[in-house]
Amino acid sequence: MSIDRRLTAQHDPIARRRVALWLFVTCGMILVMIGLGGATRLTGSGLSIMEWAPIMGTLPPLSETEWQRLYALYQKIAQYELINKGFGIEGFKAIFWLEWAHRLWGRLIGLVFIGPLLWFAWTGAVGRRLLPRLGLLFVLGGMQGAVGWFMVASGFFPDSTAVSPYRLVVHLTFALVLYAALLWIGLGEWRGDAPRDAAAPRGLRWLARGLAGLTAVTMLAGGFVAGLKAGFTYNTFPLMDGRLVPAGYADLSPWLRNLTENVAAVQFDHRLLASLVLLATLGAALRYVRHVSGLAARALLVLSVSVIAQYVLGVMTLLWVVPVSLGTAHQVLAVLVLTAALVLLHATRAPSSR
């Protein structure tokens, strides 16, 4: 393709919107992946596949002999001995298929990303401005598979029936970084050179930054809640064991360990952060909703509704002792809250000097 046509494609609004749609589709697939990861964790399926085979693992077991081999491997780990002992080959298949689907979906994300990326790079729709960033994100996506295996492998240690909370949070962090980066680039391509909201109050711009950051921190705190299975204790609201701050909040030493290893502290911190997100969002809506228009106004409204829904869903998940359906929905809706916060941040950026 000629250089002139490549340069034209980079500035073609239709071509840029096609790039944006591709990035949004990839974001949607990552959202599904995060939901599958939540269901995998809640059902204890993540340790059912004890081999990391990036190529051959694409195919499921095709014979009864292969099923029995994989089941025999699973019977060697503590999760089987302490939790699932005797549940039989059919019980093993039930947890195997969910983990296999989770891994297969990750591979599909890679294909959906790299194929169009090569095409858009060839046609010039993605030029020197974006190609290095998107190439780096593809590499990070590949690393996410390795990080996922690094997380799963921590569940094979003696007496371990689940993965390391620290490794789980690292895995979640990778997913959120990829999602946020692709969404941000996609928003830039979709909106193109459309004028930014010059009328957006500076206070709202700073609030949008704070809300996006606070939402991300709350989600990572939720990762430690999930990793420690902290949602299965203190199943009352708003008090925890009859107290606002649980009695065992600072039991561990040194004190910083409480933030990531103490069930009482981890759950309390997640509640506190979620409450701050709720109050800050409602405060921003009440203060600024009449002072913005267009995308900023819609994003602020969606953010407010989604944060309220997420807060209610979180309380329900806690009170009902984390059923798989509610726990998975809570994880997915958290990503949608982050999406609305990032859209608001993008819509209220300061006007371009160009």
Image (cartoon, rainbow, N blue to C red):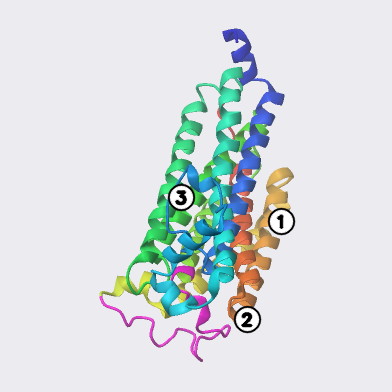
**Residue 169 showing in the rendered view:** yes
Q: Amino acid at mark 1?
A: Leu
Q: CA distance from mark 2 to mark 3?
A: 29 Å
**Image point (55%, 84%), residue name:** 235
- Does the stretch in magenta take in 101? no
- Does the stretch in magenta take in 243? yes
Q: Which residues are magenta?
A: 226-253
Q: Dot 2: what SS?
A: loop
Q: CA distance from mark 2 to mark 1?
A: 29 Å
Which is closer to the viewer, label 3 or label 1?
A: 3
Q: Amino acid at mark 3?
A: Phe
- The quadrant of the rendering that contains the C terminus is top right
- The quadrant of the rendering that contains the N terminus is top right
Asked where in the image residue 247 lies, by quadrant, the reply is: bottom left
Instruction: Confirm or deny contact between disc 3 and disc 1 (CB under 8 A).
Output: no
Residue 206 percent coordinates (x, y): 53, 51
> Which residue in the protein does label 3 denote?
174
Residue 352 percent coordinates (x, y): 57, 31
Q: Is residue 265 above or below residue 35?
A: below
Q: Dot 3: what SS?
A: helix
Asked where in the image residue 318 lies, by quadrant, the reply is: bottom right
By secondary structure, the bulk of the magenta-drawn segment is best described as loop
